[in-house]
Image: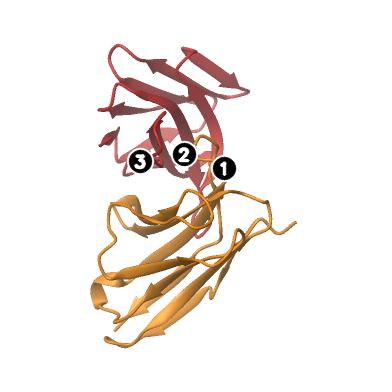
Amino acid sequence: NAGVTQTPKFQVLKTGQSMTLQCAQDMNHNSMYWYRQDPGMGLRLIYYSASEGTTDKGEVPNGYNVSRLNKREFSLRLESAAPSQTSVYFCASTENLNSPLHFGNGTRLTVT
Amino acid sequence: GENVEQHPSTLSVQEGDSAVIKCTYSDSASNYFPWYKQELGKRPQLIIDIRSNVGEKKDQRIAVTLNKTAKHFSLHITETQPEDSAVYFCAARNSGNTPLVFGKGTRLSVIA
């Protein structure tokens, strides 16, 4: 039982490049989330998926897109990376919106 | 929407002393208040949570108190140890179809 698995762990991009961050959970959770963490800013929600087939914007969605591929997988795409997107990205899942969050180990992204 | 303020942003205590971190929230409909601990380079992990039908909850050296009238909740750590050094995040969520909103975090340093 791996919990929430994120790939890659580290990534360096040049401005304008695109990439997809992958996230998968094996806990049969209904809801999945993408957060970014920046120093002094806490955890800010980018997008979330309350259930398979739905996605909603969070606090900071600009510059990102998401896909809830199936119940297990929720990917985050940067179409044209910018230095402002340098951050640590965490995927998380919950059984439902009223349950505790389970986080993945994070992806450290640097955009130069 | 919900807004969560967390204080202080940094806190240093001597080993064995108590530490208190306070959070306020804006949405009177919020009813779930978890606390997460994040060690350096690791993912956030749930340490304790409280729901609005109780005023206090304890788990060994950790306790959380909730004052719904004043819309604030606090984390109390007694007999602090060096391994308590971490960043702590509070969060709040209402009963609607919305995800958790996090505070900006408190960096706790326990000095041996």
Which numbered disc, 1 or 3, marks the residue that appears first in the sequence?
Answer: 1
Q: Quadrant of the C terminus of chain A?
A: bottom left
Label 3 crowd bin: few (<14), some (14–19), many (20+), radius 10 Å: many
Name which residue lies at 50% across and 33% down. B15
Which numbered disc, 2 or 3, marks the residue that appears first in the sequence?
Answer: 3
Label 3: which residue? B101
Q: Which shade is chain A?
A: orange
User: For the image shown, how many numbered marks are present on the structure?
Assistant: 3
Local secondary structure at mark 3? strand
Label 1: which residue? B83
Which numbered disc, 2 or 1, marks the residue that appears first in the sequence?
Answer: 1
**Residue B25: x percent and y percent?**
29, 28
Chain assignment, label 3: B
**Residue A53: x percent and y percent?**
50, 58
Label 2: which residue? B110
* Separation of residues labelled 1 and 3 (CA atoms): 26 Å
Q: Are marks 1 and 3 in contact (CB under 8 Å)?
A: no
Mark 3 residue type: Val
Q: Are marks 2 and 1 in contact (CB under 8 Å)?
A: yes
**Residue B54: x percent and y percent?**
49, 13
Name which residue lies at 70% across and 59% down. A2
* Separation of residues labelled 2 and 1 (CA atoms): 8 Å
Chain assignment, label 2: B
Above or below: residue B95 compared with residue A83: above
Label 1 crowd bin: few (<14), some (14–19), many (20+), radius 10 Å: few
**Residue B24: x percent and y percent?**
29, 27
